[in-house]
Amino acid sequence: MALSGVRVLELAGLAPAPLCGMILADFGAQVVRVDRLSQSAAALAHGDVQGRGKRSLALDLKQPQGAAVLRRLCGAADVLIEPFRHGVMERLGLGPEVLLQENPRLIYARLTGFGQTGKYAKSAGHDINYLALSGVLSKLGRKNENPYPPVNLLADFAGGGVMCALGIVIALFERAKSGKGQVIDASMVEGVAYLSSFLWKSQNLGLWSQPRGENLLDSGAPFYETYRTSDGKFMAVGAIEPKFYNQLIKGLGLNLDELPAQMSSSNWPEMKKKFASIFVQKTQAEWCSIFDSTDACVTPVLSFEDAASHQHNKERSSFIKNDPGEISPRPAPVLSRTPAVPSCKRDPFVGEHTEEILLEYGFTKQEIAKLHSDKTIEIKDLKASL
Ligand SMILES: C[C@H](CCC[C@@H](C)[C@H]1CC[C@H]2[C@@H]3[C@H](O)C[C@@H]4C[C@H](O)CC[C@]4(C)[C@H]3C[C@H](O)[C@]12C)C(=O)SCCNC(=O)CCNC(=O)[C@H](O)C(C)(C)COP(=O)(O)OP(=O)(O)OC[C@H]1O[C@@H](n2cnc3c(N)ncnc32)[C@H](O)[C@@H]1OP(=O)(O)O
């Protein structure tokens, strides 16, 4: 796999860093998740559902000898992902100056909401806050309604986990030439703002000149909308270009000559009502049979279950099942020679691999026994968990 041989240490955090680590693991990196000891309340609150392909080492970083263990691990690692707000790693004596001095090849990825500097650097926050500060949240939502956060996909995962993974891969690529590591300041505010570059750069085109929910691509236009069907499901319509819009109109059984011009925005509210009154007359399956073989850009809005079993997705094996029978999306994108090979195993238990990881990183059995008796590490008793 593309990233095989890359050693990653991911300090356990909430949603974004686990996705970042999972992406790297899916594409072949050896990812060790450094967990808090399982008795701690914080560990309970960080139940990771994105542990695919990772191993777990349970380590108490608050003990000086625990922090020393991480320093030693970092000496032999390629990448460290840390998901805490600015100042936490420094307080533990694990800041970038220390770790990069010991291993100048280390890529030290700091995945935070607000970044390492600035007024909010030390503030708590979640996806919705980062999205808000980026400006993007102000654009999301329907007409006359409050801004609406589309679950925690945008800042946490797109602007956070994925952007951080991109930064790591770029830094690894650069390191192959320079031999040097570096620090990655991955702020979710900036990550999601960067993703929204099109919105910023298209402002002069008049694409966003109307209030929220009244523009071409934000549910203002009748041809870029979702519509309820007679069985309570929905269809998604994205017929922007005139040649595709014509096919939409045909499929709906309307006559183009009897309708206002597609881009006449003053007619959009009335056209939406017309489309809605037609879509609600047939089931989702009936609409699919009308539109499936056309270029009208009309697709069913699928539930997770339906998405996994949809013919197109099945033909591409877009969803996978692991050994415990859980279904989830296959890693994307698909690389032709070195595709991701996601692990089928269940996610690791906290501390399941502590001993084997420490041995692998050069710790002796005696050192491990001492750390264990000092309660600096935890070694999961698998029999007790199964
Ligand atoms: C919208 C999302 C958030 C979604 C969260 C959900 C995924 C989860 C929320 C509730 C969970 C459920 C619940 O707990 C009940 C079940 C429990 C069960 O076990 C699993 C199932 C559950 C249903 C469970 C399921 C899910 O987990 C939940 C539903 C987001 O937006 S996520 C993005 C958040 N933001 C960031 O990541 C940005 C950067 N980070 C931060 O800003 C802060 O970390 C944050 C997130 C604000 C949290 O602040 P906090 O004060 O808690 O932490 P920090 O200031 O960063 O400091 C960390 C301290 O911890 C110490 N530490 C770290 N590692 C170790 C270690 N190995 N050993 C010892 N100590 C450690 C570190 O030293 C810091 O200590 P100090 O504060 O003393 O310096």
Image (tube, rainbow, N blue to C red):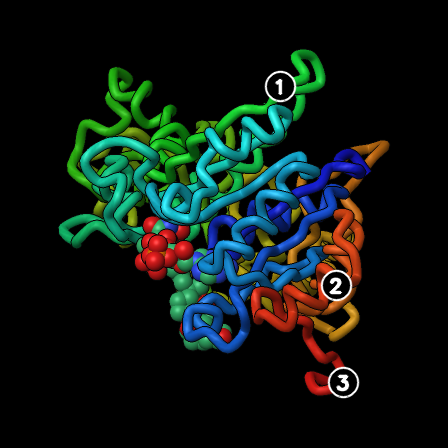
Q: Which residue is mark 3?
A: 383
Crowding at label 1, few (<14), some or many (≥20) Cα neighbours within 10 Å? Answer: some
Residue 253 shows in the view: no
Q: Which residue is mark 1?
A: 180
Gap in Å between the C-alphas at discs 1 and 3?
43 Å
Crowding at label 3, few (<14), some or many (≥20) Cα neighbours within 10 Å? Answer: few
Disc assigned to residue 306:
none
Residue 4 image position (x, y, % from top left):
79, 38
Residue at the outermost right position: 337
Residue 81 vertical placement versus 309 (above, below): above
Classify mark 1: helix, strand or loop.
loop
Q: Which residue is mark 2?
A: 355
Q: Residue at x 58, y 69 (%)?
A: 374
Where is ligand 1, by quadrant?
bottom left
Residue 108 image position (x, y, % from top left):
53, 34
Q: Amino acid at mark 3?
A: Lys
